[in-house]
């Protein structure tokens, strides 16, 4: 038997069965116990997927709730949509609730989740990346970057002269600096001989 209404398809709870029913027809065809089992299986499956979406993708969940005027049943976590009519709802799980009140509560909860995630992102990501301070509170890790000064591109003889000057300064002696043209020539010749 296959029953379809085009808007709502209810599949048989038996694994791999392709039968589709109206919920009202299903209630006439099976025992109340089997109907309860069917509703529980549906709620568990849809509820699990919906809870995962709320937890892992709160922005997407918020958009879905707003766009489709749908919310999560406070009792069984099945997605419930409201097209028109009274604000008072009753889910197939039996729970009664105010649609607008439940919508406000769920949107507020999603906003809190989104706010927490944004705060974590601004503070540098995962709260597990922070160290504990002495009082047991969280403390940010500070990352220090040491910048190495780049050495200008000098010839090997210039580099050697520079090293010798630094070594002389470090040992307390004053490096010999050429004072006259002859001294400069001598230093240049000495430098060429060393390289």
Image (spheres, helix red, strand yellow):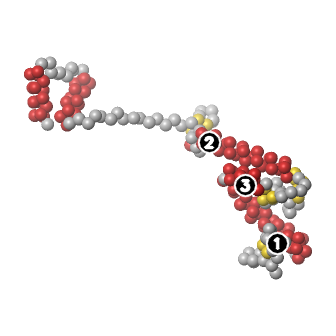
Give the image location of residue 2, x and y in percent. 80, 79
Q: Give residue 21's mark.
A: none
Decide which of tag 2 and tag 1 comes sooner along the chain.
1
Give the image location of residue 44, x and y in percent. 76, 63
Q: Residue at x 76, y 45 (%)?
A: 108
Q: Give residue 120's mark.
A: 2
* CB-based contact (under 8 Å), mark 3 and mark 2: no
Question: In the image, is residue 96 above or below residue 12?
Answer: above
Measured Cα–Cα span from mark 1 to mark 3: 24 Å
**For the residues carrying marks 3 and 2, which lies nearer the camera in this image?**
3
Q: Give residue 5's mark.
A: 1
Question: In the image, is residue 95 above or below residue 125?
Answer: below
Q: Residue at x 70, y 46 (%)?
A: 113
* CB-based contact (under 8 Å), mark 1 and mark 3: no
Q: Report which quarter residue 53 is drawn in.
A: bottom right
**For the residues carrying marks 2 and 1, which lies nearer the camera in this image?**
1
Q: Give residue 64's mark.
A: 3
Quadrant occupied by the C terminus: top left
Measured Cα–Cα span from mark 3 to mark 2: 24 Å
């Amino acid at each position: 038997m296959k029953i379809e209404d085009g808007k709502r398809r209810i599949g048989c709870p038996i694994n791999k069965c392709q039968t589709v029913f109206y919920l009202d027809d299903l209630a006439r065809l099976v025992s109340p116990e089997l109907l309860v089992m069917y509703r529980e299986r549906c709620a568990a499956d849809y509820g699990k997927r919906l809870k995962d979406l709320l937890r892992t993708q709160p922005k997407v969940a918020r958009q879905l709730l707003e766009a489709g005027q749908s919310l999560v049943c406070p009792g069984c976590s099945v997605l419930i949509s409201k097209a028109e009519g009274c604000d008072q709802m009753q889910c197939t799980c039996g729970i009664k609730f105010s649609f607008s009140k439940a919508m406000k509560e769920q949107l507020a909860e999603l906003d809190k989740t989104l706010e927490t995630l944004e705060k974590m992102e601004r503070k540098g990501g995962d709260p597990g990346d922070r160290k504990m301070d002495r009082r047991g509170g969280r403390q940010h890790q500070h990352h220090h970057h040491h910048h190495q000064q780049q050495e200008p591109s000098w010839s090997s003889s210039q580099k050697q002269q520079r090293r010798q000057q630094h070594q002389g300064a470090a040992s307390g002696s004053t490096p010999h600096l050429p004072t006259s043209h002859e001294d400069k020539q001598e230093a240049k010749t000495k430098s060429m001989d060393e390289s």
